[in-house]
């Protein structure tokens, strides 16, 4: 076992973790990847994102000024290598936008894309084919995380959350995200991954409103393997 995890192995044994695909490496994916790697999910990362880092990303994503104009997948790889014990050879980068023809790994998958259209494409490709899908969403000061496993109730619950982009609330550009919410989402995603791996439990949906400190969760069930 990596000595970096000696103080957390009683909560999550890194030997029990699995490879992870991160689809969308911005405000959600960048923070979530680092959180997961520091928890011990560093056997293998597959990073997907077609964008490059812009100056507007530095304040709300985990990147620094040195990453501007670099593809987000490469910038996140740099962070993983320099901030965690993840080895460079254990990170594969795919600087592409997701569409119907994109091949995807059938492993634990974290979704951090910025449109419902992209989520629907990912879901159509991966439903019933990955052991655990964790979808993080940020809207201003609110956060939602959905966790999906391969059973009818879980998949049906998630499918009903995939509304159209036209039905989404349009927030002013200056109110779409703030970094502390991204940290919250990363923690929620890390918790979902840890509980699935170590206890075979999920919470189908977790939500948090930072303005009111209101939170709720639903569909917390035991998985019988």
Image: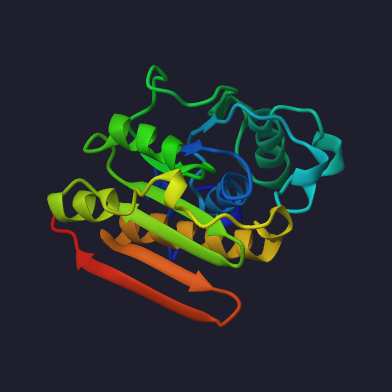
Colouring style: rainbow
- State the image coordinates of residue 86 (x, y, percent, origin top left): 60, 39
Would residue 37 be seen by someone viewing this image from the given angle?
A: yes
Q: Residue at x 44, y 68 (%)?
A: 207
- State the image coordinates of residue 9 (x, y, percent, origin top left): 47, 61
Q: Residue at x 80, y 28 (%)?
A: 69
Q: Quadrant of residue 79?
A: top right
Residue furthest toward the front? Answer: 166
- In this view of the protein, which residue sits in the foreground, 141 or 41? 141
Looking at the image, how many numbered discs can be counted on the residues? 0
Residue furthest toward the top? Answer: 101
- In this view of the protein, which residue sits in the foreground, 159 or 189? 159
Q: Residue at x 67, y 33 (%)?
A: 72
Q: Is residue 68 left or right of residue 158?
A: right
Would residue 19 be seen by someone viewing this image from the given angle?
A: no
- State the image coordinates of residue 139 (x, y, percent, origin top left): 56, 59
Q: Quadrant of residue 81?
A: top right
- In this view of the protein, which residue sits in the foreground, 152 or 163? 163
Identify whether 105 is placed above or below 143. above
Q: Residue at x 79, y 45 (%)?
A: 56
Q: Is residue 178 left or right of residue 216?
A: right
- State the image coordinates of residue 77 (x, y, percent, origin top left): 66, 33
């Amino acid at each position: 076992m990596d000595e970096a995890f000696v103080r957390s192995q009683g909560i999550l044994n890194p030997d029990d973790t699995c490879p992870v695909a991160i689809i969308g490496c911005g405000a959600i994916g960048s923070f979530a990847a680092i959180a997961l790697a520091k928890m011990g999910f560093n056997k293998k990362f597959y990073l997907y994102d077609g964008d490059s880092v812009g100056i507007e990303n530095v304040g709300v994503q985990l990147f620094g000024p040195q990453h501007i104009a670099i593809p987000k997948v490469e910038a996140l790889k740099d962070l993983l290598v320099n901030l965690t014990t993840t080895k460079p050879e254990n990170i594969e980068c795919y600087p592409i936008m997701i569409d119907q023809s994109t091949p995807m790994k059938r492993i634990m998958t974290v979704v951090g894309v910025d449109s419902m259209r992209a989520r629907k494409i990912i879901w159509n490709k991966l439903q019933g084919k990955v052991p655990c899908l964790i979808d993080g969403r940020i809207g201003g000061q609110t956060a939602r995380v959905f966790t999906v496993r391969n059973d009818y109730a879980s998949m049906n619950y998630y499918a009903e959350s995939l509304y159209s982009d036209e039905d989404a609330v349009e927030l002013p550009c200056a109110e779409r995200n703030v970094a502390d919410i991204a940290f919250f989402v990363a923690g929620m995603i890390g918790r979902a991954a840890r509980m699935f791996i170590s206890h075979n439990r999920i919470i189908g949906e977790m939500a948090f409103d930072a303005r009111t400190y209101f939170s709720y969760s639903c569909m917390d069930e035991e998985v019988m393997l």
